[in-house]
Image: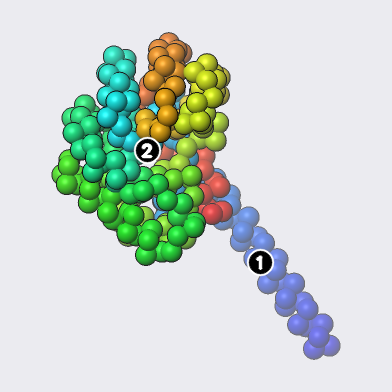
Amino acid sequence: MKNIKIILIAFIIIIIGYESGIMIANYMKTNGTLLNKISDNTELVWNGPRDKKVIAITFDDGPHPRYTPKILDLLKKYDIKGTFFVLGKHVEFYPETLKIIKDEGHEIGNHTYSHVDVKKIPSRKIEEEFNKTQQKIYDVIKEKPKIFRPPFGSYNTYLKDLAKRHNVKIILWSSSQDCKDWSNPGVKKIADTVINNVGNGDIILLHDYVNTTSQTYEALKIILPELKRRGYRFVTVSQLIKNKDYEYEMKIIEN
């Protein structure tokens, strides 16, 4: 008899837990406040709102003394603001290029000091790479970035905690918008990947620093006018996510 009571109690607890879970899930679908709070705490972003024809174009690994100015000139031609995730070591080498990025109204983000994979280094090294780059950027433009993109899109619990402590959001990119331009797959392939897969709220991943000849600039000469012709508006990452509806990023909670 005692065992039957225990089984019944356990069954009731399971049922109550299940019903509570359903209620919470339904609440999150209909009430943005709770969902936003949970999502904000994770500090991970892949895209902006899907109901607006707005996108963000981003560039990693710079600044580069030759390619970055050419890209900046092209962005200016089409009245586009971009976001540049810079490496601390390149900021050291090319501070004047970083100043131009800032002066022309583009957003600057932290991309570590030496392009490390945060999953393969100890916690203290992650913090060192982050802090050193924040300081290098501040030394040049007198501002510390509020956005951070980990190389290779890698992240772990320590990195998310670090971002929270510094009030910095971790910015990744839309899954359909990695054209691997750094590998020089061909100008047409880069352009086609971006144009044929673009969607509202996308964060496009490109690179303004490569160790070989870059095809990104030539691809941008195709990409930018075509996306503007289609009615897309370009904004910085922070502008894109300012009023973001995190309902589109349920997977953030799972991480």
Residue type at tag 2? Asp
Say if 72 sits above or below 155 in the image. above
- Alpha carbons under labels 1 and 2: distance apart: 51 Å
Residue type, label 1: Ile
Q: Where is residue 225 in the image (x, y as percent from the top left)?
A: 40, 12
The disc, 1 or 2, on the residue closer to the chain's N-terminal end is: 1
Task: Identify the residue under disc 2.
Answer: 61
Write the residue at 49% across / 57% down: 120
Q: Which residue lies furthest to the bottom in this view?
A: 2
Q: Is residue 234 above or below residue 114?
A: above
Would residue 245 be found to the left or right of residue 1 on screen? left
Of 138 and 5, the residue lying toward us: 138
Q: Which of these two is toward me, 16 or 70? A: 70
The correct choice, above or below, for 153 with respect to 203 in the image is below
Residue at position x 28%, y 55% from top? 131
Q: Which residue is labeled 1 in the image?
A: 16
Q: Which residue is drawn at 64% across and 65% down?
A: 17
Q: Is residue 74 above or below residue 49?
A: above
- Judge depth for marks 1 and 2 and give the one in front: 2
Q: In this view, does 88 lie to the left or right of 154?
A: left
